[in-house]
Each structure stands twice: as C-alpha cells, then as structure tokens.
Image (tube, grey):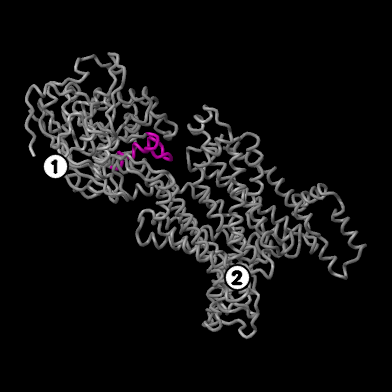
Amino acid sequence: MAAEALLSIRDLAVEFRTEDGIVHAVDGISYDVFPGETLGIVGESGSGKSVSTMALLGLIPQPPGRIASGTAMFQGKDLLKLSPKELREFRGDEVAMVFQDPMTSLNPVLKVGYQIAETIKTHYPKEPDDKVTSRVVDLLRLVGVPNPGERSKQYPHEFSGGMRQRAMIAMAIANSPSLLIADEPTTALDVTIQAQVLEVLKTVQEETHAATILITHDLGIVAELCDRVLVMYAGRIVEAGDVLTIFRAPRHPYTVGLLDSLPKLTEDEEWLRPIPGSPPSLINRPSGCAFHPRCFLTQGRPRCREDVPELRDAEGAGHLAACHFSEELAGHQSKFSEPVEAGSGA
Amino acid sequence: MLTYIARRILYSIPVLLATSFLSFTFITKSSDPLANLRANPRTNNPVILHHLAHVYHLDQSLPVRYWYWLQDVFVHKLGISLLTSQPIWPDISVAIEHTLQIILLAQVIALVLGVAVGIYSAIRQYSPFDYAMTSVSFLGYAMPTFWLALILQILFVDIYLKWHVRIFYTSGLNSGVTSSTWSIDRLQHIALPVVTLTVVSFALYSRYMRATMLDVINSDYVRTARAKGLPERLVIFRHVVRNALIPIVTVSALQFGALLGGAIVTESIFQLNGMGYFFITRLQTNDVYSVMAYVMIVAITVIIFNLLADILYGYLDPRIRYD
Amino acid sequence: MTEPTTPLDVRASVVVDPMAVAVPLDLAAAEGMELEARSQWSYARRRFLRHRLAMIGLVGLIIIFGAGALANFVAPYSFDQIDLTYVLHAPTTVGHHVFGTDEIGRDSLSRIIYGIRTSEQVGLTVAVVSTLFGLIVGAIAGYYRGWLDNVIMRITDLILTLPLLVVLLTVAALLGRSSSVWTIVLIIAAFYWTGIARIVRGVFLSLREKEYVEAAKAVGAGDLRIMFRHILPNTLGPIVVTATLAVADAIILEAFLSFLGFGIADPTPSLGKLVSEGQQFPQKWWITVIPGLVLVLIVICVNFVGDGLRDALDPQQRRVRA
C-alpha cells in the first residue's frame, strides 16, 4: 500500500557559474520522501547531496547558482517555483534544516533561547511570550540539554559543540515540521558526541513523527538511522533502495566499492580497499556514466563511455540502480550480508 | 569588568610616564627654551638669562627638570609657557573645546552616513549605488586632508567673490563677535573643516562597514536565520548589522587619534583656534612646555578612547569577557 | 551500439573486485579527472593579472613613477629655472607651461615631476626599510614570545600612543626645520615600522601554533629554519599588501610634513610643498590643485595595486560546498 509522498522531486538540476566554467552540482535527480520515514543521502564531497536539499529551501545564492530545472512538490506546491516570500512560510515551519557546523551556525551575540524563540515567533507571532518561553525550555529538555531553563539564557559560546548541535535540532523542530533535513549533523563533532547527537535525532523522530532527510558520507550512520537510502555520485543518484537491501546486496559498482572499502569489525582484514582514482570534476564530467573511469565492472565496454545510465529497477521492490550492467552484479552479496546485531544505542 | 578597567588604567600610567619622559627628553635636548630671548637684543642679557634659567630649573639635570615639569602638569595645571610667561591651561582649554566640537561633529556625521552607506552597499552588492559609493570612498580616502581643505577654501572664496554670498566661512571661528558654541555663525565657520574631516572618516567607515557586512552575510548563522524563515529585513538588521557593527566601534575609536592629526592641518588652513593650531604655532615658536602640554593631552585622549573602545567592544560581544 | 548480453556463465565469472579497475588511470585523466597541480604562486600571479583595477593602477604607477625617475629627461625645465616673463601664468600650451607657473616663473609641470621623484624616493625607501625592519622585529616578537615579545610590545606601545603625525612633526620641527630627503625618510621610517611589526607579530603568533610548525620541530628543524621556510612564506601575502600600502602612507606623510613647513627643504620640490605654496594665491588655483591631484592619483593607483595583490594572495575564497 503506497503512502502518499510528502515530498516529490523530479529532474532537479542545479548549476553554478564559476570562473572556470559551469559546475553541474546536481544533474537531474528524482526521488520521493514519505511521511515519517528517514531517508539517507550518501555521497562523497562534491556529489551534490547538500546542494540538492539547499535548493529546496531556496538557500542557494542565485548568482552564481541557478536552479536549471526540476520540480519539488510539497504539500501541493512546487517549492522551486515559489516566490521568496511564499517559500519563507515553509522554512522553519513545515520544512526545517539542521546544518553541519554547530560552532558557526548560531549567532554568537544572541542568546540561545532567543534564537530558538525567534523560529516560533516568526511563524506564530501571536503566541504569548510566556508560552513561547516555556516551549523553548521544553524543546531544550527534549533534546537533552541539562538545566534547560538556565541554558536558554546563555550565549552559544557557553555551549559545548554537542550541546550546540542539540540546540540547533531544538530550533529546527520548534514548529513541528513535517520534513526535517539534517545536513551532515555530526560530521564536525567528536565521535562520542556523534553518538549522542544521533540518539537525539532518533528521539526527535519518535516524538515528532517528522520525515527526515539525513545527508552524510558516513555509511555507519545510515545503517543506524535510515529506512531508505540514496547513493549519489557526481550530481546524480546511482542507487536507491531500503537500507537492508542496499547494504546486503548493492547493485551499482560505486555502492559495491563503498561498502567494500569499509572495514568489517567482525573479521580480520589485511588491507583497506579504497575505490581507485579521484572524484570527477563537475565542470568537465566524464562522458557517459560519470563513474566509468573508476569502475571495475565496465571492463572497457564502450556503452559506459557513451550512454548515461538511467535509474532503473534492480532486484527487489523499490530498489533502483543506474548502471548498464547492474544485472551482472546479481547474486553478489556484500560483506555485510550476515546479520550482526548492531549496537542498540546507549 | 571593573578589575579590567582598573588594570588598564594602571597599565596606562607607566606608558604615559614613559611617553612623556621620552618626549620631554627629546624636546628639551633639541631646543633651547630661551632661544627667543637670546635672539632679542633687548633681553639678551646674561644676568636676566641666568636668573630665568634658575627660576625655570633649566640649570638642573634632566630627571630633576622632568620632575618639576610633572609637578607643573598635575599640580599647577600644566604650568607656564616659557615664551609668554603665561599659564598654559587657559589657552589650551579653549583650544580643546573648539577642536572637540569639530571632531565630534565630524565623527558623528561620518559614522551615521558611513554605516548607512556601508549597509546599503553590502545588501545591494555590485549595484550602481555600490560602485558609485565605492568610488567615492576610494577618492575620499586617497585625498590628503590638506588638499581637500584648500580646495573647499578656494571654492567658497570664489563663490563669495563672484556672488557676494557667504555660505560657509573659510577662516576663523566666528565673525567678530564672540559667539556661543552652537550658534549659526559658529556652525557656518566650522562647516568646512567639519566636512573635510568627515570625508576621510566617512570613506573609512563605509568601506569598513561594507567589508564586515559582506563577511557576516556569508557566515553560517545568517544561513541558519534564513533557513528559519525570517524575513530578509530582520535577517539583515537583527543578525547581520548587529554583528558587523562591532568592529566599527574599535575603528572609530582609533580614528579619533587620526582626526587629531588631521585637525592640525585643517585648523592651520582655516585659521581656527584649536588644538592643532595651538600645536603648530607653539612648535614654530619653540614654545617647548606648551608643546609638551599638547603631547600629554593628546596621549591621554588617545589612551582614554582606546580604553572606551575596548569596554564597548566587550559590552557588545558576549564572547569577550575580561577577567 | 548495443552490447550483446553476456551469457549466464560469463556473468557468474565476473570478478566483483572494485580495485580491479580495467581502465588505466591516465585514460581516466583524459576523461576529466583533475590530476594536474599548479603552484600557489602561479595561481596568485594569474589572479593578479586578471584584476582589472590592479592593472590600471600598475600602469598608472609606472607612468607616474617612471616620469619621476626620469625627471631629468622628461621635465621640460629644471625645477628652479626662473622665467620672469610668465609669472603666475595659468596652464597654457605656450612655452610648454602645461601646468602653469608659480610666482617667480618656475614651471609647475617640471616642479611637479621633480616632486614626484621626491615622493617616490621617500615612499619606496620608507616602505622597504620599515617593512624589513618591522618584519624582523615582528617575527622575533611573535615567534619567541616571552620577555622579548613583552619588551618589543612596550616599545611599540610607546610609539603608537601618539598619532604618527604629531610625533613626526615634533621630531622634524625640533631637528631643524627643514631637512634633506633622506633625513625625512629616516624620520618617517623610524616610527612607521612599529605598525608593520604589530601586524607581522600577529601573523607569526597565530601561525606558530599550526601543525606544520610542530611537524617541522619534530623532525629537528631549528628556529631560524622554521621561521624562514615554514612561517614566512605564509605571511608574505599580508606583508606584501602592507608594504604596498606603506608606500602611499609614506608619501602622504611626507606631503603633510612638507605642507606644514617641516618637511623637505628648498630648493628640492615636494608635492606637499607645492600645494602649500598655492595658499597665498587662491585665485591661481592650478598651483594648489594640480600637485594635490597628482598625490591623489598616486595614492589611488597604489591602493588599486594593493587591492589586487590582496585578492590574488588571499587563499581563502568563497567556496560553495557541494
């Protein structure tokens, strides 16, 4: 039974003018997000994962950036065609974003509680002050900030990195958005703090039932938090499906390489196995499939050089892969195919 | 905070003493305070000179002279000019008042205009307004103060000669009758020097404000503010300007020192009885103790303004806590 | 062109080994992978040459300073040549007096050109000397810190307490009212280095904490080597810009001194002195305006070049994250 998609993106393309040429950061991607689910977007730096979501909220500076094409249907409206004023009504209310670097994402001269309250007051200006204040304190408590009453009167530099990110999350869910976008929320944090913040995200999801788009380059996070995952490379989606299937049986050579490069904790491995080569230039993309210069499956076959592969059905429901020869990977199981009980969050 | 202020003041005192001692040493060593009297055949009498040297402690060693001078400064209201045998304080206090009026006026106008233009240029980057203002600032910054003052003077003398209308006066502080500080007559007289000093400061502030605005506009927390759905107007004024204004405080405090230097030239050109004029005339006539008095007052002023700037900065930016 | 579908047994034998890339990497380079490296300086040079305003400024400076340096050949008259037939003449094409004459018939254009020569002598020398000195002092203070830093900072504090113009005027006035060019250079440089030392010290203070300094120490590099080979190249950007702007600063300071009568002695012309001479004749505007205009042009050109250098040498560029 197919639920109604909360967000439907079709053929989104974003490009940037630079002095070296036009950078095709996002090159025609389409996907859906369903209510209440957690969708992970995985990719290297430069894959276009952040740009695609920032475009939704109109956060791409329009020179030098440009939304070249695409639609993004959300609650019956195309976000990409809205005027800035209309888009502002969604930002922070129905669609909210948590950014990567908590150290610089909060205004240093304003109190934390004030900045959270600002989100509420912008969209619900008629709310009485005392209600807003108590909601701010509740939010901080929800995300696990100790002494939320006192803390809300402090400045960002008095918060630690992990706490700042919690405050950012509190700010994002202040108006109970139906879609929460988290752009590498833990990348700038210590590993131990990362685990805590991920816990917060899980809690927040359970409380608010918001759909979440989680952007990361860390496959471990995807495995822990996400229901479905998109793999992006050079501005396009190369594989999509639910987390278990993708991890067990990837059907795109890039995903295969990604999983293969992860060390497996339950076995001995002598050498790490990275994907050879470097990510492609987004100005002069390789012809045909962007991955073919680094691909083990192509074996020099000209089709990879000539035709851009479309996302098409691989095995299983909802499992898509953009590879001309994805069938040849049938039966391949990654090293993660045996179930191991993953740590159940502390 | 109070301990910080106390510490700063305590620290300033040795600096002040050292600066004044160095200046004193240099000035007394390099000039003969009685030169004017020696030059005048009527007063060039060994007995008189010897007596004066004794009275003014000129025959003592340097540290002793310095000590007497310090006493003069703090106890006897800056002491007596060797040239005129008159106390220094009355003259210099009048001069201070006049210069203060001009400099404060120039600072306020330059700040208000400069900040406004800087904000607007940054919001409308690369617009015709931005380019025009950048060019104006560039020009204003490059113009030597004395040149601008002279051009204004020439211009308004010309206007008077051609059309017999005095819009702004080009010399003096008032037209004959001693006018009060804020009378129209006074304002007409100080208009041109104020404009001269305003131009350079305005250029500095608008360029600086634009630069800090652009810096802040691209920072992550502004992106967060936009992502929250704030209207652009609030994003700019509540988040961007508030942060961009902080460095301007320091810049404007430092600018006071530069304006004191600029006043030297403007007051000479426009014949205004201010600190700068005082300094130049006393320098030209070798009136050493008056020059020292000027040096002390300027040093104290600069120290005070720097301290004020730091305090204000600490007040505006919660990340700075002086303990 | 359609590829024949591979039969089942061939499929099963496909080795799923991501490291076994069949396509060699240089072919990959041809397909658009970034493998070429360029040095930092060539990037900087390219950016500088592309900066339009900096190029305009550079050309302007070459013309102006070139005229000054070659004054003996370029100026139509000597700067003290008196021609009483053309006293206080407005700019005219008669007799090459393109910028007019002053009250004893000296040609303004020639005097201005010689004045430019004085300015560039002062500007360039002060900039070089005070930058070198400020660099050494600031580097020592910033790198070694401790009591040496304290002493140096106190000294600069003393000098910087008073506005530079006040200090310079006092010194210049009391050392004998007017001086030779090199005396003025010495006076200005003797105080100007403090500002540069402060800036350099700040940069060294921040850079000495960087990891590459630790790494250099770990392999046994001595202090001097670290300062010169590791930290210094990273400071050259702001230092070059500061030195460039110092040229304009020094020229203006000398102009101020000369204007007030405490600068360069007669008969050597200085742009500041030329402007002050015009004060007596407000009707003969060219005596005042034109030398000042030349000063403004010099400062603007130097600032353009400085801006271009700053943009070119600044490795922080606004990048958009992908």
Residue toward you, B262 or B186: B262
Task: Locate residue B257, reporting x and y percent.
Answer: 60, 54
Which image quarter: residue A316? top left
User: What is the distance, in whole Å, between disc 1 and disc 2 at their CAs?
Assistant: 80 Å
Q: Which residue is mark 2?
A: C72
Q: Residues within 10 Å of mark 2 (few under 14, many from 20)?
A: some
Q: Pointer 2 indicates a residue of which chain? A: C
Which quarter of the figure is the N terminus of chain B placed in? top right
Q: How many marks?
A: 2
Which element carries disc 1, helix, strand or loop? loop
Q: Name which residue type carries label 2.
A: Asn
Q: Residue drawn 75% across and 55% down? A: B27
Which residue is identified by label 1? A76
In the picture, measured across the screen, residue B309 lies left or right of residue B119, that is right
- The one nearer the camera, B86 or C296, is C296
In the rendered image, which quarter is residue B255 located in? Answer: bottom right
Indicate yes or no whether the magenta region holds residue A107. Answer: yes
* Chain of the residue on which disc 1 is drawn: A
Residue C94, placed above or below residue A25: below
The image quarter containing residue C30 is top left
Residue A270, compared with residue A201, is above or below; it is: above
Q: Quadrant of the C terminus of chain B?
A: top right
The nearer-to-camera label among 1 and 2 is 2
From the viewer's perspective, is C158 left or right of C285? right
- Residue B197 image point, x, y percent: 55, 62
Check disc 1 and give the amino acid type: Gly
Q: Which residues are magenta?
A: A102-122
- Of C32 and B234, which appears nearest the observer? C32
* Callout 1 crowding tier (Cα within 10 Å): few <14, some 14–19, many ≥20: few
Q: Is residue A72 magenta?
A: no
Q: Secondary structure at mark 2?
A: helix
What numbered label is drawn on residue A39? Answer: none
